[in-house]
């Protein structure tokens, strides 16, 4: 099967359906296939839901290393509150969220609420905090009353061990519900997609330095920590599936055979108009929100391999198997649809804010670069440097000074042969231009893929929250190696 091109996936249309050939995925599949139902694995489960009440959610998140149920077996991984993924936080705009992060790992960690539009200062979404083993850190976030609804997530963000800890099992979903909900659904589901590699004894496998340079990809691609779970639905019962790409580096383009799901949201808020599932690229950190009106029969949710470039003609990959684009498709889940009376329901259009009519106070250009022989600042060594504008991350340096209350236009370039997903904390980005083309409808994201040798343009309204935070490549191995910068708005 020919891998789809990242350019094709980034632009809005034009992806034909490819067959759903599914190859074996190695040892683990062979070991378990005899014990599993041929139509798929265990029945689908979701992480525990923690819901805010009367404008408040108070919860404790314990990050620990232990035995967790992963891919249907007992595995030694990290997890929050004893599970992979951690609990799902259900919030509403205007909520106050108080989280106690308890560090039961044997290494430093912290907590980031990815995509939430909250203060990055103090005990807020402050990624400069370090929570030592045995310590508890109190976090408090106040969501503005007009916080965009959507699917967000949380994960550790201590520079230098983000990739290891996310790959290790530390992530969970956050849902911000829509006070003006106009989608009439019968069932909501949260699907946190992640990947990891386990050895025969059920322990995490640490990827080689070469794999880390490319961005590690786990052999197992899981949904809520499960391998190919089975979901049951009924004709006439509309479902809403929220999907988080919590993979450390893996890009996902999803397809569902036998069904025609419509994507109604990506990262931040609702889309102006729904789109086909296969047209959406989920870079690491991206989310999507889709409506499934089940059609009789069955369906299979599949992640197609995505070509995200290569290094020096594959030289870096020697001895490490195929590059990401040559990977096999992965089956994520199976859907069995029971009978029912079909009802046709439409999907209302929305009018997201459009910054194209607003005054731009300043334009900037930031460029992802990879070079030979970097100083490898917290990354643990290797032949390549990973920088933005030629500089590795320095927590004490402010790279971009922005005036609070202004709209800026940022062009993000990529001088390297690999794709890099650009992520900005706190302030969402409106995608203006990708692949030299203007984006027609307002589209709000917090992670935007920047294709190899390509560039994208976004606009950002630096409003509501002043303070200092970061932007970075969301291939977490690259972030840990220095592909991150700081921005201050005041
Ligand atoms: Cu999802 Cu700075 O991260
Ligand atoms: Cu983030
Ligand atoms: Cu990168």
Image (cartoon, helix red, strand yellow):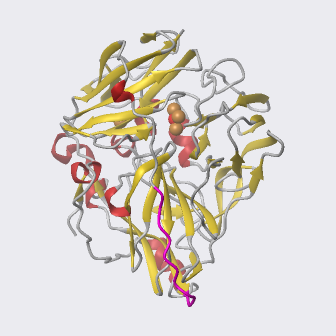
Where 18 sits versus 405, above or below? below
Q: Start and end of the magenta stretch?
A: 338-348
**Left-right relation of 303 to 91:** left
Where 294 sits versus 363, above or below? below
**Left-right relation of 213 to 427:** left
Q: Is residue 482 visible?
A: no
| Residue at the image position 74 percent from the left and 36 percent from the top | 95
- Image position, residue 258 (x, y; %): 39, 80
- In reply to whether residue 343 is colored magenta, the answer given is yes
Foreground pick, 23 / 470: 470
- In reply to whether residue 400 is colored magenta, the answer given is no
Foreground pick, 34 / 305: 305
Q: Quadrant of residue 302?
A: bottom left
| Residue at the image position 31 percent from the left and 60 percent from the top | 305
- Image position, residue 113 (x, y; %): 62, 36
**Left-right relation of 304 to 97:** left
**Left-right relation of 459 to 394:** left
- Image position, residue 481 (x, y; %): 42, 29
């Amino acid at each position: 099967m020919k891998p789809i091109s990242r350019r094709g996936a980034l632009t809005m249309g034009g992806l034909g359906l490819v067959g759903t050939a599914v190859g074996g995925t190695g040892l683990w599949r062979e070991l378990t296939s005899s014990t599993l139902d041929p139509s798929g694995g265990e029945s689908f489960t979701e992480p525990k839901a923690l819901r805010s009440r009367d404008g408040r959610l108070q919860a404790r998140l314990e990050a620990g290393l232990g035995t967790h149920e992963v891919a249907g077996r007992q595995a030694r991984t990290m997890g929050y509150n004893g599970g992979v993924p951690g609990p799902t936080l259900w919030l509403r705009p205007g909520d106050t969220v108080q989280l106690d992060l308890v560090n039961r790992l044997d290494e430093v960690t912290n907590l980031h609420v990815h995509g939430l539009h909250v203060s990055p200062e103090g005990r807020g979404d402050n990624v400069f905090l370090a929570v030592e083993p045995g310590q508890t850190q109190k976090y408090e976030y106040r969501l503005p009353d007009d916080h965009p609804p959507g699917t967000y997530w949380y994960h550790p963000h201590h520079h230098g061990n983000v990739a290891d800890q996310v790959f290790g099992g530390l992530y969970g979903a956050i849902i911000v519900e829509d006070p003006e909900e106009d989608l009439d659904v019968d069932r909501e589901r949260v699907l946190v997609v992640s990947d990891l590699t386990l050895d025969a004894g059920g322990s995490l496998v640490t990827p080689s330095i070469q794999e880390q340079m490319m961005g590690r990809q786990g052999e197992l691609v899981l949904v809520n920590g499960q391998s190919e779970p089975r979901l049951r639905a009924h004709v006439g019962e509309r479902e809403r599936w929220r999907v988080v790409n919590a993979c450390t580096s893996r890009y996902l383009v999803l397809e569902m055979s036998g069904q025609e799901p419509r994507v109604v949201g990506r990262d931040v808020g609702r889309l102006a108009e729904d789109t086909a599932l296969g047209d959406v690229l989920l870079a690491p950190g991206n989310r999507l929100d889709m409506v499934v009106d089940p059609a009789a029969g069955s369906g299979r949710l599949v992640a197609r391999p995505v070509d995200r470039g290569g290094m020096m003609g594959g030289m870096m990959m020697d001895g490490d198997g195929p590059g990401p684009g040559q990977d096999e498709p992965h089956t994520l889940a199976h859907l069995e649809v029971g009978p029912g009376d079909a009802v046709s329901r439409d999907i209302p259009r929305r009018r997201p804010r459009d910054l194209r009519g607003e005054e731009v106070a300043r334009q900037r250009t930031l460029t992802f670069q990879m070079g030979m022989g970097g100083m490898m600042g917290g990354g643990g060594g290797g032949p390549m440097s990973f920088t933005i504008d030629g500089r590795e991350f320095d927590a004490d340096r402010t790279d971009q000074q922005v005036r609070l209350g202004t709209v800026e236009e940022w062009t993000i370039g990529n001088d390297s042969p690999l794709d890099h997903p650009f992520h900005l904390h706190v302030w969402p980005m409106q995608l203006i231009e990708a692949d030299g083309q203007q984006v027609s409808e307002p589209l709000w994201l917090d992670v935007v893929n920047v294709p190899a040798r390509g560039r994208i343009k976004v606009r950002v309204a630096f409003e509501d929250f002043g303070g200092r935070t970061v932007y970075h490549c969301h291939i977490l191995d690259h972030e840990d190696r220095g592909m991150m910068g700081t921005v201050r708005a005041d």
